[in-house]
Amino acid sequence: MDPKDIKWEELGFGYIECDYRYVSKYKDGKWDDGAIITDSNIVLNECACVFQYSQSVFEGLKAYYTKEGDIVTFRPDMNAQRMYDSAKRLEMPPFPIDRFVDAVEKVVAANKHFVPPYGTGASLYLRPFMMGTNSVIGVKPADEYEFRILVTPVGPYFKGGAKPIKIKVSDFDRAAPCGTGNIKAGLNYAMSLYPIQLAHREGFAENMYLDAKTRTKVEETGGANFIFITKDGTLVTPKSDSILPSITRRSIMEVAEKYLGMKVECREVPFTEVKDFAECGLCGTAAVVSPVGMIYDHGEEIYFPSGMDDMGPWTKKIYETLTGIQRCEIEAPEGWIKKIN
Ligand code: PLP
Ligand code: COI
């Protein structure tokens, strides 16, 4: 697609094929040098480990223009580390952290013309992913792998932009039963496809998943972590080993404490406490900070005092400070912003 034909302001969260992707292959115990290529197709044997046993992990991060005209990414080393950990959990050879960050830089620089202009609200989404590529029929890891980063310009993850969404408490578990909930693996997300379609058919934007063991504690949604604000302005965010350790959430905790002077609590959140919070939001690379107006729990509607029209006041402050830092309008903590040359 010619970037001149893209209506940046109207973009949703979809895939638009861009010109270049980064690829590196692993064979005979080592990663090759990697390259920027044009072919968006991957041809694999029918018995490739990724098809048979879903041996795949992925990441997500964004690149955007600042007011000054620089292109920047936000904490790519954190994505590199998380992908490293995910790969180890799935018996894959981790892609080296410095090479991940270098690949991010190269693929964004190659696709500069697809980075949405400043002020459009859109950004370039990067999807690093890795898969087992050789044929495997007994249950075992592959010996050969492909690491790839594709890019695509995206707009808001939820329809309606910053308008509060309605979500429902799911009866399903998001994580795979083998406890892979804290990594980004293809298998995890496939498990959430049925519940998310069900939620959409019922008119909800997302699911609130509760802990699989007791179904009494708040975990996360299909694609974002939760933040809650108490009536006295404390930020509360669920602590759990089976949720994805969101980079956005970890950044928000620091922003809330150091920039906004808020009290921050990362702890177990009983579902029974949810009705007492003043504000609720979802956070993630794709979701950024998206306000939740109502949670539907088996016939009961929990509306937050912040309402269905706007972000709550604290959520808004968090959103503005975080995105201000990401776009270099507010000074970032050391090492958070990586400029693309
Ligand atoms: N939780 C899930 C299940 C996700 O898919 C994502 C998105 O990456 C997040 C949380 C948010 O993580 P991050 O802020 O690192 O993008
Ligand atoms: C992200 O925010 O990067 C995600 O991975 C969420 C979703 C698109 C799966």
Image (cartoon, grey):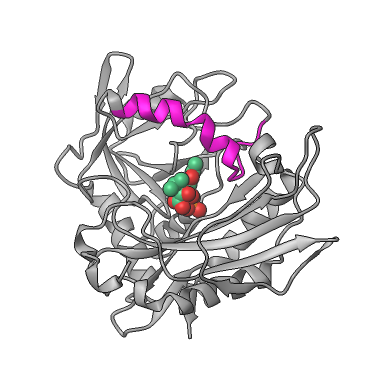
Do we see residue 194 in this rendering? yes
Does 58 sit left or right of 319 as displayed? right
Residue appearing at x 43%, y 70% in the figure: 19
Q: Is residue 50 above or below residue 96?
A: above
Look at the image and say whether residue 187 sits in the magenta stretch: yes
Residue appearing at x 48%, y 21% in the figure: 172
Image location (x, y in percent) of residue 329: 32, 76
Looking at the rendering, the stretch of residues picked out in magenta corresponds to: 179-200
Q: Is residue 80 above or below residue 227?
A: below
Residue projecting furthest to the left: 309
Does 321 sit left or right of 187 as displayed? left
Residue appearing at x 47%, y 74% in the figure: 108
Residue 258 picture quarter: bottom left
Residue toward you, 309 or 106: 106
Look at the image and say whether residue 153 sits in the magenta stretch: no
Image location (x, y in percent) of residue 251: 47, 59
Q: Is residue 199 above or below residue 257?
A: above
